[in-house]
Image (tube, rainbow, N blue to C red):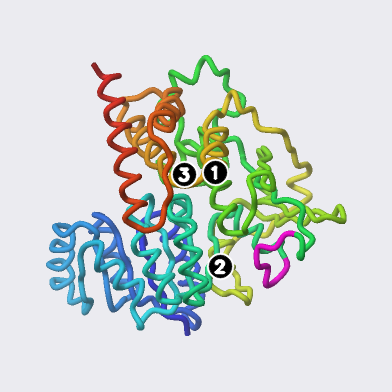
């Protein structure tokens, strides 16, 4: 029986994780759940799964949950704040941590789980983008098991040799191929992107995701962040990572070997598949996903990404090649830009422009500690906000 903490349980990854867990009550015990401010959702999850701990990032929301849990007769310890999240992630009462908190707020708890040697199921891509070297060093030092949840990285993990240690030459690996659907604007004329609304950007053709990651998918920044993730996860150089547009989202990614073989992982676009793979690893369990019907799929398409249409992808490669704090600056500026777009304060086509302006104005510096990460993150956010104020005025 694996004791599980789901950090970010009310988001799409958390909900899908609980759906898989619910199918296998003999394998998993939900020990802890967490959310930001979604009291109603977290309370419902607590009533169903009866965790020992529930954590709210927001203290006021935690107090609301505490009162409602008491009224409902729920015997669950309610905690609040970043330190509580990190404490749960490192708790000896937890074996497996699903890290599904969106954005930079999830970083401290991810590092805590890694340093505590947990089986870490990583759905928070910003942890690797912002602190990839720190996280991978912590994993190696503690003996933690890091399993990627992004469908693309999970596919690569499955297609690489068991026990792959980042040595491409010894494993006979030539390069990694990350597939991208192209999002909702793959065929949209570039001149029309300025008029895109948040609802249009969030209407992904294949995946059901949160609004921030949906916008990232529409700009292809999501794929750019995944390129940076893949570099840290698998020890790949930028030149060893290719992105290919695959609108059907059936091939989730591929590994190319030096003998000409290309191994791919295929499946219907459903996050329960990589979640179930990581939860049960190294075994396999039924995630409740409909089996792939190749006769219905019929054909698969692939094309090269247009970097003029998707400049965010080019910016991500540039940040990865620059190194140091550049990926942190990229991620922070993008988070500010996307939030502003979702609030209808910035046009869709200005998202990559704002990120580029920050990367040009803030010099990349070495990163040796979490304090360095947070300093670079804060600097980029301040610069992005200043640029936005200039636009508003």
**344 lies above or below 229:** above
Mark closer to the chain start, 2 or 1? 2
State the image quarter where residue 328 is shown: top left
Q: Residues within 10 Å of mark 3 (few under 14, many from 20)?
A: many
Foreground: disc 2 or disc 1: 1
Q: Are marks 1 and 3 in contact (CB under 8 Å)?
A: yes
Q: Identify the residue at image location x=36%, y=51%.
A: 373
- Relative to 171, 32 lies left or right: left
Q: Identify the residue at image location x=74%, y=38%.
A: 301
- Name the secondary structure under disc 2: helix
Q: Identify the residue at image location x=58%, y=61%.
A: 274
Q: Are marks 2 and 1 in contact (CB under 8 Å)?
A: no
User: In terms of depth relative to the viewer, which is nearer, 187 or 235?
Assistant: 235
Residue 211 included in the magenta stretch of the image: no
Measured Cα–Cα span from mark 2 to mark 1: 30 Å
**135 lies above or below 125:** below
Q: Which mark is drawn over residue 320?
A: 1
Q: Which residues are magenta?
A: 161-168
State the image quarter where residue 271 is shown: bottom right
Q: Label 3: which residue?
A: 327
Mark closer to the chain start, 1 or 3? 1
User: In terms of depth relative to the viewer, which is nearer, 339 or 90?
Assistant: 90
Image coordinates for residue 192, horizontal then vertical, percent: 50, 16
Mark closer to the chain start, 2 or 3? 2
Residue 317 visible from this viewpoint? yes
Image coordinates for residue 113, horizontal then vertical, percent: 40, 70
Q: Label 2: which residue?
A: 276
């Amino acid at each position: 029986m694996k004791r599980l903490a789901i950090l970010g349980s009310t988001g799409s990854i958390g909900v899908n994780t609980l759906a898989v867990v619910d199918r296998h009550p003999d394998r998993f015990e939900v020990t802890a759940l967490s959310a930001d401010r979604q009291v109603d959702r977290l309370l419902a999850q607590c009533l169903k799964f009866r965790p020992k701990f529930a954590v709210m990032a927001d203290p006021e929301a935690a107090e609301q949950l505490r009162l409602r849990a008491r009224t409902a007769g729920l015997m669950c310890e309610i905690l609040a704040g970043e330190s509580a999240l990190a404490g749960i992630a490192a708790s000896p009462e937890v074996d497996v941590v699903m890290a599904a908190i969106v954005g930079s707020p999830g970083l401290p708890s991810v590092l805590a789980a890694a340093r505590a040697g947990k089986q870490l199921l990583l759905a928070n891509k910003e942890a690797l983008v912002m602190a990839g070297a720190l996280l991978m060093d912590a994993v190696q030092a503690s003996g933690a098991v890091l399993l990627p949840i992004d469908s693309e990285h999970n596919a690569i993990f499955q297609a690489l040799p068991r026990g792959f240690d980042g040595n491409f030459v010894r494993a006979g690996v030539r390069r990694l191929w990350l597939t991208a659907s192209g999002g909702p604007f793959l065929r949209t004329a570039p001149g029309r992107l300025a008029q895109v609304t948040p609802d249009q950007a969030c209407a992904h053709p294949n995946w059901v995701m949160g609004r921030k990651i949906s916008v990232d998918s529409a700009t292809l920044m999501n794929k750019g962040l995944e390129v940076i993730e893949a570099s840290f996860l698998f020890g790949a150089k930028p030149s060893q990572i290719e992105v290919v547009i695959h609108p059907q989202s059936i091939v989730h990614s591929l590994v190319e070997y030096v003998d000409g073989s290309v191994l791919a992982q295929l499946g219907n676009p459903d996050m329960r598949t990589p979640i179930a793979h990581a939860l049960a690893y190294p075994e396999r369990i039924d995630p409740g996903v409909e089996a792939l019907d190749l006769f219905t799929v019929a054909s698969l398409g692939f094309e090269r990404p247009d970097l003029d249409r998707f400049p965010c992808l080019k910016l991500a490669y540039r940040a990865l090649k620059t190194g140091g704090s550049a990926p942190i600056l990229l991620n922070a500026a993008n988070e500010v830009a996307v939030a502003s777009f979702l609030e209808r304060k910035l046009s869709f086509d200005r998202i990559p422009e704002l990120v580029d302006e920050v990367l040009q104005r803030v010099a990349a510096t070495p990163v040796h500690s979490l304090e360095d990460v947070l300093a670079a993150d804060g600097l980029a956010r301040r610069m992005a906000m200043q640029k936005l104020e200039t636009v508003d005025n």
